[in-house]
Amino acid sequence: MVYIDLNMVRAGVVSHPSEYRGSGYNEIQNPPKCYSIINKKILLEYFSIQNENNFREEHDNWTTAELQNDTLIRNQDLSESIAVGRKSFIASIQQQLASRAQKRSIVSVNGVTVWEEPQIRYSTVLGAEKDVLRPESTCSWR
């Protein structure tokens, strides 16, 4: 969750997620009076925290710790996965997608379960001669 909150910091758009208006960080720290995107009940259950104010404080602590670590590195497992979460969550998404979920694999890495799309190089699909874009392999539209 904090990883996603820090996407715009990682991209260099802002120095703190609170500066990005559409961030999940702001929805947690300053929840809207209506039309909330985040289901707070499920969030509190997931983290085993009883009180919304306690959760806000913990969330801010997690965010501050990540910013102080100065390790805003892109995590490939989180960034390139279709879904990330509990195995039961991933399985339910996979079941909902049914046949569209074929050839995708569920992998647990360092205690995190991710659902991955197979990585295929263009050359295996298009052939080696089209592996690199060159002026002679392009065309112009008139």
Image (cartoon, rainbow, N blue to C red):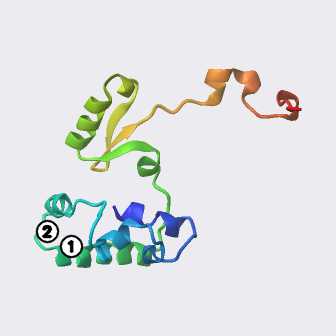
In this figure, which residue is indicated by the disc labeled 2?
49
Q: Position of residue 104 (x, y in %)?
A: 39, 30
- 3D distance between C-alphas at marks 2 and 1: 6 Å
Identify the disc placed on residue 55.
Answer: 1
Q: Are marks 2 and 1 in contact (CB under 8 Å)?
A: yes
Q: Position of residue 138 (x, y in %)?
A: 83, 31
Give amino acid for label 2.
Answer: Ile
Residue at left offset 29%, top offset 73%: 31
Give amino acid for label 1.
Answer: Phe
Q: Nearer the viewer, residue 138 or 119?
A: 138
Q: Residues within 10 Å of mark 2 (few under 14, many from 20)?
A: some
Rendering quarter of residue 83: top left
Please, is residue 61 above or below residue 1 in the view?
Answer: below
Please, is residue 30 above or below residue 111 in the view?
Answer: below
Rendering quarter of residue 5: bottom left
Which mark is first along the chain, 1 or 2?
2
Disc 2 element:
loop
Q: Position of residue 11 (x, y in %)?
A: 56, 64
Which quadrant of the rendered structure holds the C terminus?
A: top right
Q: Nearer the viewer, residue 22 or 63?
A: 22
Identify the disc placed on residue 37.
Answer: none
Task: Please state if 39 lies on the left or on the right of 48 as rendered.
Answer: right
Q: Position of residue 81 (x, y in %)?
A: 42, 43
Residue at left offset 21%, top offset 64%: 40
Residue at left offset 41%, top offset 60%: 4
